[in-house]
Structure formats: C-alpha cells, structure tokens
Image (cartoon, rainbow, N blue to C red):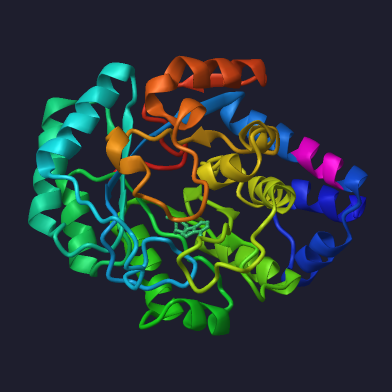
C-alpha cells in the first residue's frame, strides 16, 4: 500500500484498479501515511489556509425526487419555503458585514428561480461589491441558462454527480439521467465557471469499485472544487432504514482526492460535521481547505433538512464566525475570508 500511496503522491494519479486496491487494503497506519501525504500537498498549494463561504439555502422546493434527499418532491411532510429576492440580498449584506466574500446560493430545483430573477440578484450584488464571488448550487439547468448566469457574474457552480454507478444513479434519481448530469458539468466547464462536483459516500449498494470509478471520473473532469460527504438517512425518504456513510471513509476519500487533484478546493462538509463533531478538523488535516457556514435566515435552517440531524447552530452558523475561526486556529490552520478562487482559474 505504501508503494501505491507514494505513486499517488508522486504522479497525482492511479488507475481505477489501483484505486480499488488501495481502498480495500488500507491499514490504519497506511491511512495515517496517506493523510500525511495529503496534508503535505495541500500545504504546498494552499498553505494552511481554510477558506470561508457563506451558504444561503434559497429554497427547499424541489421538482426532483432523489431517494436519499429530505426535500424530495414526494416528501409531503417537508415544510416548504422560498426566500424572496430581498431576503437573499439581506443575507448577503449580513454576510458581507460579518466578513464573508463568497456567497453560495443553494436550493432545490425550484422553477420560481428563473434566469431573470437570478440575474437580477447576481447583478445587484456584483454592482454593490467588487470583491465577492458568487457560487450557484441549484441543480440541472439548460446550457443557455448557465451561460446567462455566468455573464451576469456568477463565478462558480456546484453540481455533484452523486455516483457514477449508472444503475444506482437511475434507481435513486427518478426521471433524471447520469448522462445529462455529465453534460451539465461539461457545459459549466466550457462556459468558464469554477466547477464543483462530487459524490455521496455510503449510498446503499455501493462497492469499492464504484468509489474507484467516482475518483477516476473526478480526475478526468478536473473540477476546481470537489464536495463529498457521507449519505445520512432522512426519516421521510425511502432510504430511511439504510445505514449511511462513515466519517472514517469520508476522510480517507478526502485525502485521496487531495492527492489526485492537488489544487482543488475541498470543503469539509456539513454532513461530515453532522456525523462526527470533530469531522471538520479531521477533514482539514486530510487535505480539506474550505468551510461553508450557514448564512440562511435562522427560521429556514431547520426546514432545509436534506438528512436527519443536520447541524446549523454553533460552529455551523455563519454568525459564529469567531468560534469557527478559533476552532480552525486551534486545529493549526489559518481562517481566510477573501473570495478564495481556485489558483488555476481566471474568468473568461
Ligand atoms: N445525506 C447526505 N447528503 C445528502 N444530499 C442530499 N441528501 C443527502 C443525504 N440524505 C447531498 C447531495 C446534494 C447535496 C446538496 O446534498 O449530494 O448534491
């Protein structure tokens, strides 16, 4: 395994077969070694910095019906909300005064958010502030829509591919296709966005070979950002009785991703912080370099329940910036509030 880890660190690449072998045979000591290597690479490219993003959950109304997701269209128990344009702008104003310089608009696939409405929000913010980045995480849209939003000033787009196991993808995402997901990712890249993709860990039925394929997919896509996290069952979904992913596996995969994509922006996600109170810090040590505290209006945070037990107070909350910064400093890292672009990106 040392041989494979050294090869991965040296070449920033392994074959699918090698990745599968590595995932299946890591002893605890090997894993520590892998994490050390990932830490070195992260340090070389981004030092000890951890970038902050203010996450605004703009709507939990969604036309999709993903089996794992708490805000799926069929969940009649979900308490739905949608932020108005003014509410979104207010969140950003509040975030800006707190020091945040990246705002991530995340939401379900809610047709209310037309190109016109989003353009207006993006243009308003970009004319008010010259030093901010805007990230969108609003699911699949047409190429023309992606193009318009980029021209309006959006800088980044997050769209996880969720899993490259086509059979499982089709089962878990009614009326959606992996092919269209991949097409969206390619469009986003060619338009010029900083693109983020990623997958879920511990979805029922996934095998090591699937993660190896997810990793090869990411390597080939060369995204600027990668978001991975454990699947956590939600009580009002068809997967409510399934097991869920572990923090251990998530952290191992974070380290491998750091080595495969040395300059990637890699968040220690909320889902990781939810299943392990120390998950975030462990993530930073394994190569993660982004944190996305919640900046949504307080009364909405509970409603944006993708999975059970989602944390949104204390260290998850954008208002608790000092607490979050202290936690990061204590773990040995430097909190940074600039917009924090991927070092390989320039706006087209
Ligand atoms: N557990 C963990 N992550 C989830 N997501 C959706 N539902 C769950 C869940 N039950 C993730 C998806 C999506 C992101 C916004 O949230 O990967 O892309």
| Residue 103, image x, y percentages | 31, 36
Residue depicted at x 47% and y 32%: 316
Q: Quadrant of residue 313?
A: top left
Magenta range is 31-37
Q: Say which residue appears at 87% left-offset and 55% top-offset.
A: 26
Location of residue 154 (image quadrant): top left
Residue at the spot 67% in from the left edge and 33% down from the top edge? 278
45 or 323, which is in the foreground? 323
Is residue 152 shown to the viewer in this render? yes
Question: Is 284 positioned to the left or the right of 315 in the image?
Answer: right
Would residue 134 be seen by someone viewing this image from the given angle?
A: no
Q: Pinpoint residue 162: horizontal percent, then vertical percent.
A: 51, 65
Please tell me whether residue 44 is drawn above or below residue 117 in the rendered image: above
Decide if residue 107 is on the left or right side of residue 337. left
Q: Main secondary structure of the magenta part?
A: helix
- Quadrant of image for the N terminus: bottom right
| Residue 255 rendering spot, x and y as whole percentages | 70, 45
């Amino acid at each position: 395994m040392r041989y494979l880890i050294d090869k991965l660190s040296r070449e920033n690449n392994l074959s699918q077969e090698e990745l599968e072998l590595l995932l299946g045979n890591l002893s605890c000591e090997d894993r520590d070694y892998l994490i050390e290597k990932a830490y070195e690479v992260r340090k070389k490219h981004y030092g000890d910095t951890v970038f902050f993003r203010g996450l605004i959950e703009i709507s939990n109304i969604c036309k999709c019906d993903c089996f794992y997701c708490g805000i799926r269209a069929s969940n009649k128990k979900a308490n739905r909300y949608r932020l108005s344009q003014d509410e979104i702008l207010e969140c950003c104003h509040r975030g800006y005064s707190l020091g945040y310089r990246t705002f991530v608009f995340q939401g379900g696939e809610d047709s209310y958010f037309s190109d016109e409405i989003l353009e207006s929000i993006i243009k308003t913010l970009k004319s008010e502030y010259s030093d901010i980045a805007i990230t969108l995480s609003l699911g699949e849209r047409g190429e023309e829509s992606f193009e318009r939003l980029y021209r309006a000033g959006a800088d980044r787009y997050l769209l996880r591919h969720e899993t490259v196991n086509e059979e499982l993808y089709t089962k878990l995402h009614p009326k959606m296709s992996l092919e269209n997901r991949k097409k969206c990712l390619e469009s986003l890249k060619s338009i010029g966005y900083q693109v983020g993709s990623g997958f879920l860990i511990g979805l029922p039925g996934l095998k090591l070979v699937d993660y190896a394929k997810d990793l090869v997919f990411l390597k080939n896509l060369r995204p600027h950002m990668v978001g991975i996290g454990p699947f956590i069952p939600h009580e009002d979904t068809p997967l409510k009785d399934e097991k869920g992913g572990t923090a251990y596996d998530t952290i191992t995969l974070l380290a491998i991703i750091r080595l495969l994509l040395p300059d990637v922006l890699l968040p220690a996600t909320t889902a990781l912080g939810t299943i392990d109170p120390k998950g975030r810090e462990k993530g930073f040590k394994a190569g993660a370099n982004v944190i996305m505290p919640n900046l949504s209006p307080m009364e909405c945070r509970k409603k944006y329940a993708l999975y059970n037990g989602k944390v949104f107070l204390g260290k998850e909350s954008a208002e608790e910036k000092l607490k979050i910064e202290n936690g990061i400093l204590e773990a040995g890292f430097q909190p940074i509030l600039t917009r924090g672009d991927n070092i390989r990106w320039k706006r087209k």
